[in-house]
Image (cartoon, grey):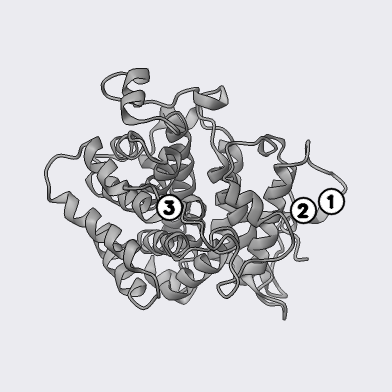
């Protein structure tokens, strides 16, 4: 996998493995998000009162009226994938600037939050913006709405919402980690530059960058422990990194403290900022017996359950691939067909893109769904 990503030469087995990890990452994040939606806004005591002593163990109809319903975290993650594919398609142009492509993608998501439905006349919006199921508000964070309310793009020098420390930018950041042909420091930088478009505090944007680097390592076939050490090394050079670094180190330390408990997850989450939610998600990924167990741990607490579930699901999906995901949960997942279509388009672009974009390339039909403009 790593050699293929570095050289751009992908064998059939490597392509299949990467496709499974891409699918696993995106579906895993969506499953964790959907599971956690049933616990968002509840204390641990309230979760147990509603669902029983073991807490929330299966997807529930929750606040959105159907099992498997996702939140704005998954919606934004899908637009992250859409923006990344467009950036890759445009990389041979003189105007190549991936953060701008992602900002345009996020602005297309913002339109789904205020419009009644897709505008078929806006062909430049592409196919994802015409998916009617996305035109439903699913608890979008205020920072996401205000940060994308106008055309000005937040940057590291002038970020949007500079006091915002929440986990929402991290919860949409997993797709950046699937750029396996990029160096980890570049993946981190891209995630940070896209996070500050809505979340301008270092805790929020560095948590997004850290999560991206973790997914990047796992998608390249690394173990989670190794990916964490690489992430810590890259964070060390970033101003304001200490809360995120401390959170990752606390997650590692908690693994040695005995059997996992909801109380330990709540301790890691702390006041619920992005560093704490990432710490809890990493811990649950480390101690989970399987994906189902890890996700249950990640959502049963009084913090941001859907964000923690999304972060944990992306890590476990990247680590184990699509086939390790709970089949019964997948059958009820909202938007599953859309997630799979995006995942496969992304995997195709990453493994075969250079040949497809060459003058002699076959220019397959799916590529036309991602306008270069």
Residue 122 point in image, percent of width and height: 84, 51
- Asked if 175 appears above or below 185 in the picture, the reply is above
- Asked if 50 appears above or below 241 in the picture, the reply is above
Q: Which mark is residue 125?
A: 2
The residue at which mark 1 appears reads as 122
Q: CA distance from mark 1 to mark 3?
A: 33 Å
Image point (58%, 58%), residue name: 198
Q: Is 259 positioned to the left or the right of 371 in the image? A: left
Earlier in the chain: of badge 1 and badge 3, it is 3
Q: Which quadrant of the figure contains the N terminus?
A: bottom left
Residue farthest to the bottom, as pictured: 94
Mark in the foreground, 2 or 3? 2
Q: Residues within 10 Å of mark 1 (few under 14, many from 20)?
A: few
Residue farthest to the right, as pictured: 121
Q: CA distance from mark 2 to mark 1?
A: 6 Å
Cβ–Cβ below 8 Å for labels 2 and 3?
A: no
Earlier in the chain: of badge 2 and badge 3, it is 3
Q: Secondary structure at mark 1?
A: loop
Q: Is 159 positioned to the left or the right of 248 in the image? A: right
Whether residue 31 is visible here, answered yes or no, is: yes
Q: Residues within 10 Å of mark 3 (few under 14, many from 20)?
A: many
Whether residue 181 is visible here, answered yes or no, is: no
The residue at which mark 3 appears reads as 21
Q: Which mark is residue 43?
A: none
Image point (49%, 41%), residue name: 30
Image point (43%, 61%), residue name: 212
Residue farthest to the front, as pictured: 163
Residue 354 point in image, percent of width and height: 61, 72
Q: Secondary structure at mark 2?
A: helix
Q: Is 307 positioned to the left or the right of 342 in the image? A: left
Q: Secondary structure at mark 3?
A: helix
Q: Which quadrant of the figure contains the C terminus?
A: bottom right
């Amino acid at each position: 996998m790593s050699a293929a990503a570095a050289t751009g030469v992908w064998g059939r087995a490597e392509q299949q493995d990467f496709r499974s990890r891409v699918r696993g990452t995106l579906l895993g994040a969506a499953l964790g998000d959907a599971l956690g939606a049933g616990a968002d806004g509840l204390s641990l005591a309230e979760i147990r009162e509603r669902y029983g002593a073991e807490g929330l163990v299966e997807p529930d109809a929750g606040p959105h009226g159907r099992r498997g319903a996702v939140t704005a975290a998954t919606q934004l993650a899908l637009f992250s994938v859409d923006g990344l594919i467009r950036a890759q398609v445009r990389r041979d142009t003189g105007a190549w600037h991936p953060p701008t492509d992602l900002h345009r993608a996020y602005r297309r998501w913002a339109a789904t939050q205020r419009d009644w439905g897709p505008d078929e006349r806006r062909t430049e919006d592409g196919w994802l913006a015409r998916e009617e199921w996305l035109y439903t508000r699913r608890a979008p964070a205020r920072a996401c709405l205000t940060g994308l309310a106008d055309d000005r793009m937040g940057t590291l020098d002038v970020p949007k919402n500079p006091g915002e420390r929440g986990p929402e930018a991290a919860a949409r950041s997993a797709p950046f980690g699937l750029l396996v042909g990029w160096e980890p420091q570049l993946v981190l930088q891209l995630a940070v530059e896209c996070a500050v478009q809505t979340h301008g505090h270092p805790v929020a944007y560095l948590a997004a960058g850290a999560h991206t680097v973790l997914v990047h390592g796992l998608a390249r076939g690394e173990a989670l422990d190794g990916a964490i050490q690489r992430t810590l090394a890259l964070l060390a050079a970033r101003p304001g990194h200490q809360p995120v670094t401390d959170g990752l180190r606390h997650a590692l330390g908690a693994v040695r403290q005995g059997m996992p408990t909801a109380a330990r997850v709540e301790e890691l989450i702390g006041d619920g900022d992005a560093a704490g939610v990432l710490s809890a998600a990493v811990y649950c990924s480390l101690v989970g017996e399987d994906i189902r167990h890890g996700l249950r741990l990640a959502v049963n607490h009084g913090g941001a359950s859907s964000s923690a579930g999304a972060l944990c699901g992306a890590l476990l999906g990247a680590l184990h691939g699509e086939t390790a995901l709970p089949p019964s949960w997948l059958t009820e997942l909202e938007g599953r067909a859309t997630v799979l279509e995006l995942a496969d388009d992304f995997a195709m672009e990453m493994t075969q893109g250079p040949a497809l974009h060459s003058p002699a390339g076959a220019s397959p039909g799916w590529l036309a769904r991602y306008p270069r403009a």
